[in-house]
Amino acid sequence: MGERLIHTREHTIERPGLSYHVLEVYGDGISDETPPVVMLHGFAGSSQSMVHLAEELASQTRVFLIDLAGHGASLASPKGSAVVRYSTLKQAEDLHHILIKLELYDVILYGYSMGGRLAIQYLVRSASNDSDSATRIKHAVLESTTFGLETKSDQSARRRQDDELVKSIISNMEEFVQTWDEKPVFRTSTPPTTELSELSKKIRATQSPEHLAASLIAFGTGAMPYAGDKLGIVNVPIIFITGEEDTKFTEINSRMMKLLNDEIRSESEHHIIPKAGHRVHLEKPESVLELISKTL
């Protein structure tokens, strides 16, 4: 691929009660006319979680990596307001204002897991609002994500499950950091490289337990509004990515594909990556890079 210079710059985007940290990664000679990529990380991640992807994409375009609410340096102030501040609807509104502040249009919006859930909520918001939201996103790439839970009983059950995780994070953050990778959802025959595994663990270790817990309460899968009944209004093509070994999310993403309207579904794709589990961007980063590059 040849040697190239990679540049970074940091942005602080102020929102009521919350300052967002955004990392921009770009290469030499990148045109502002090339669609930028905005990357949204998963739970307990940060802007650093996707840097290995951003550095490869930097030869093609500008990449913006956002510390999502309650993660990294994007923390609510005062701390006591965190649960209210990290709600789904507020985060979707925040994302819109981040794109406005950074003057980003025709964005390739990539989201993994929790970040993918935020991306879905933003796509629904954009299709519902009479604003310039519709021109902000050109294509979405969603990895191992979900549209939420449809029934109140399923949502309540998931919130109870998340409440247990909240207690463990608050009571023993060190154990959470060490054991998070051992959850059944992350089982795979192709584990991430040692370097990426250690980076993920380091990112978890730097999180604020209180803010991480608040994020889970406010924006866990059981707390987010169900979006399955609104996917039909989404007006941008979506590339869904799931790992072959992640059968649960592969089935969910197949359902999401079918809920898109006929026109958008004809322009969308679902890629099931062989020998990969839930964290395709860590296990098979080349596959994710290929699919993001395809949209450029």
Image (cartoon, rainbow, N blue to C red):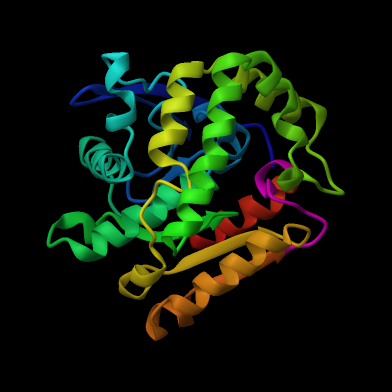
Q: Give the percent coordinates (x, y) of residue 200.
A: 66, 27
| Left or right of residue 119: residue 270 | right
Q: Give the percent coordinates (x, y) of residue 274.
A: 79, 61
Q: Give the percent coordinates (x, y) of residue 155.
A: 46, 53
> Is residue 276 a member of the stretch shown in magenta?
yes
Q: Give the percent coordinates (x, y) of residue 132.
A: 16, 56
From the viewer's side, name the closer residue of 274 and 227: 227
| Residue 266 appears anywhere in the view | yes
- Residue drawn at x 72%, y 63% is 247
Residue 171 location, quadrant? top right
Residue 260 sits above or below residue 81 on the image:
below
Residue 237 location, quadrant? bottom left
Residue 100 location, quadrant? top left
Residue 208 sits above or below residue 16 on the image:
above
| Left or right of residue 102: residue 212 | right
Magenta extent:
273-282
- Residue drawn at x 76%, y 26% is 195
> Is residue 101 a member of the stretch shown in magenta?
no
Outermost left residue:
130
Residue 165 sits above or below residue 256 on the image:
above
